[in-house]
Image (tube, rainbow, N blue to C red):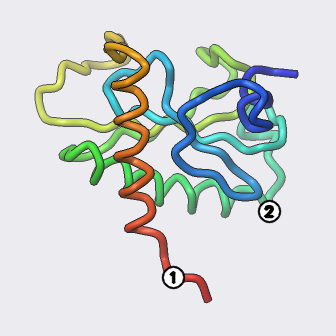
């Protein structure tokens, strides 16, 4: 089983910030900036072209929700949302990156320095900020 499948199955610990029946979002353990999240489908698909049509709406709706939550929680000026499709995928499981951005944050082109968390406590604090922001931004259930 791939590492992301193991995270989705709660077999490997991760700082999960959001999950539903189809997707899981968690903090990247090697973030570009604090709050950098990955959104994955629970089911294993390697690339964008492998995703079933019915999953696309859910994934991108949840990416939109995660985008708002990350921006709010991290007090960012914007976000970078991206998908590596096969090339540059360190884990061959489809995932969407949601990265908080600020003007003059040092990201230029595609050569990005990583900014790891100081420790697990900082990582847990950032995850909790995003979880709270997502709770506040969830649409009411019908």
User: Measured from the top left, where is residue 18 in percent x and y?
Assistant: 56, 50
Name the quadrant of the N terminus.
top right
79 and 139: which is toward the camera = 139
Total labels drawn:
2
Task: Residue 113: name its quadrant.
Answer: top left
Residue displayed at 36% across by 57% down: 133
Give the labeled residue for mark 1: 140
Assess disc 1: are there few (<14), some (14-19) or many (≥20) residues with their C-alpha within 10 Å of its C-alpha: few
State the separation of the CA atoms marked 2 and 1: 22 Å
Q: Check the image and name the residue furthest to the left.
A: 104
Q: Is residue 112 visible?
A: no
Give the structural element (helix, strand or loop) at label 1.
loop
Q: Check the image and name the residue furthest to the right.
A: 1
Residue displayed at 70% across by 56% down: 56
128 and 53: which is toward the camera = 128
Give the structural element (helix, strand or loop) at label 2.
helix
Foreground: disc 2 or disc 1: 1
Tag of residue 54: 2
**Residue 17 located left or right of residue 36:** right
User: Measured from the top left, where is residue 72 in percent x and y?
Assistant: 27, 54
107 and 3: which is toward the camera = 3
Name the quadrant of the C terminus.
bottom right
């Amino acid at each position: 089983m791939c590492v992301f499948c193991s995270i989705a199955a709660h077999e490997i610990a991760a700082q999960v910030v959001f999950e539903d029946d189809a997707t899981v979002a968690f903090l990247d353990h090697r973030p570009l900036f604090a709050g950098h999240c990955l959104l994955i489908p629970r089911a294993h698909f390697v690339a964008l072209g492998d995703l079933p049509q019915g999953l696309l709406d859910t994934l991108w709706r949840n990416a939109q929700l995660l985008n708002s939550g990350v921006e709010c929680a991290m007090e960012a000026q914007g976000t970078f949302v991206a998908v590596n499709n096969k090339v540059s995928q360190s884990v061959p499981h489809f995932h969407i990156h949601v990265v908080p951005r600020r003007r003059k944050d040092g990201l230029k082109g595609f050569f990005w320095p990583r900014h790891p968390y100081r420790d697990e406590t900082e990582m847990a604090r950032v995850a909790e900020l995003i979880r709270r922001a997502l709770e506040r931004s969830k649409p009411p259930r019908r």
